[in-house]
Amino acid sequence: MESEAPTLVDRILPATLTNRRLFEMSEAKWLGWLFSIPISWLLAWSAAILFNVPAWIASQLRKRPFTPVWKTYVGLPLQCIVALLIHRLWVYFLAIPLLYRLYYARFLATLLVGCFLWLVSRIMDQAYEHVVNRMRADKNGGEAIVILIQRLSRIVLTIVGLVAALAIFGVNVKTTLAGLGIGGLAIALAAQKSLENLIGGVSLLMDKAVRIGDSCQIGDQVGTVEDIGLRSLKLRTQDQTLCIIPNGSLAQMQFQNMARRRKLLVNQTFLLRIETRAEQLRLVLNHVQTMLDQHPAIESETFRVRVMCFAGAAFQVELFVYVKTGDWTEFTEIRQDMILKIAEIVEASGTGFAGPTQLAYVSTDKGVDALKANDIVHRANEARANDVFQFPGESRTGTD
């Protein structure tokens, strides 16, 4: 190494800089290394400009907006990678001492791995952000699991970077990986309940059983889902109480998603006065059926209007109708319109609705005719003796 010919840097720079040494390296090489850092960055920025020229020309021809690559989410990591590669090549031509070159090359390799992982993280973050925005627009409620995967991916990239840095510097990473495995097992055992909620939340989001904004009944609580997290589900009840239900408990509770119904049922009965004549009753049924058949929001194939029975002093009529909507507010409006039209039909037919009343008829009670009763008893005894008829459980021969 001492008999080696002078390098290109030693021949160009003045002898004052090449002869004076600091830590066994000439001042000229120290200055060359120092100036190589900003020069490498400027060269990387110039390369980015040259790389954008074809894209800029194409955007001008098509009259489309143009964004330089250094202003995008991958611009800065790419410039760092290019600058590190140029700086590594510069250091090679400086021909610094071998020991310095070895450790500095490992340091630059570590930075290069970090910048590469930074670039991958930026690309993944952009993809996750796009997916989360789309899920929030669709109100699927699955953005929580995407955010979790994003955070886990960052942790994984960080661990990969640390392990790669240790491997580059010559550290045995097998022991480190074994320690990470044991530590992960210990954390899993300590956070068993949290992991149960986490797995329950992931299963709930993957199955798409519920979305944000759905009206649900969970156990004995009815409300609207406000948030689906990885630990719990937030339900806003009708009295504006916020219920937080752990995801692990949802698998053991009765869960009904009322927002997923394609149609809603109206199954009610109404009473018509007992004085309603048969023709009036037929007229009411006919007009109600015609109204339901012509209603655009009623499922005409399945509805029915039938007289069920005599309910005390009234006719009981059953109304069985499917409304073609899953929105509860719209359903209540259609049901109200249908009930008002039925009321108009009943009123136009000349009858009316019956309330929960009973009719009492007052008459003069004459009591029991004793002579007629005695005559009937005498005739019954004679018929029984002559085996003309029998009471239940008796045989005609009298031997049973």
Image (cartoon, rainbow, N blue to C red):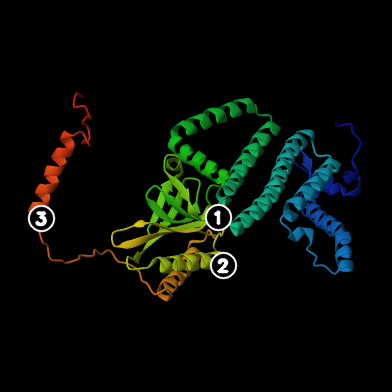
Looking at the image, tell me whether mark 1 or mark 3 is earlier in sequence order: 1
- Label 2 – label 1 distance at C-alpha: 20 Å
Q: Is residue 367 above or below residue 352?
A: above
Is there CB contact under 8 Å for labels 2 and 1?
no
Q: Which residue is mark 3?
A: 369
User: From the viewer's perspective, is 396 left or right of 174?
Assistant: left
Looking at the image, tell me whether mark 2 or mark 1 is earlier in sequence order: 1
**Residue 219 can be seen, yes or no:** yes
* Nearer the observer, 387 or 48: 387
* Nearer the observer, 104 or 400: 400
User: From the viewer's perspective, is 302 left or right of 174?
Assistant: left
Q: Residue 358 location, x and y as percent?
A: 24, 63
Name the amino acid type tagged 3.
Asp
Point out the image quarter for the C terminus: top left
Q: Kindly report which numbered mark, 3 or 2, lies closer to the viewer in this rendering.
A: 3
Report the disc number at residue 294.
2
Name the amino acid type tagged 1.
Arg
Q: Residue at x 56, y 43 (%)?
A: 207
Q: Residue at x 35, y 68 (%)?
A: 353
Report the disc number at residue 316.
none
Q: Secondary structure at mark 3?
A: loop
**Within-10-Å neighbours for mark 2: few <14, some 14–19, many 20+:** few
User: From the viewer's perspective, is 326 left or right of 238?
Assistant: right
Q: Kindly report which numbered mark, 1 or 3, lies closer to the viewer in this rendering.
A: 3
- Label 3 – label 2 distance at C-alpha: 60 Å
Looking at the image, tell me whether mark 3 or mark 2 is earlier in sequence order: 2
Q: Secondary structure at mark 2?
A: helix
- Label 1 – label 3 distance at C-alpha: 67 Å
Q: Which residue is mark 1?
A: 262
* Nearer the observer, 102 or 229: 229
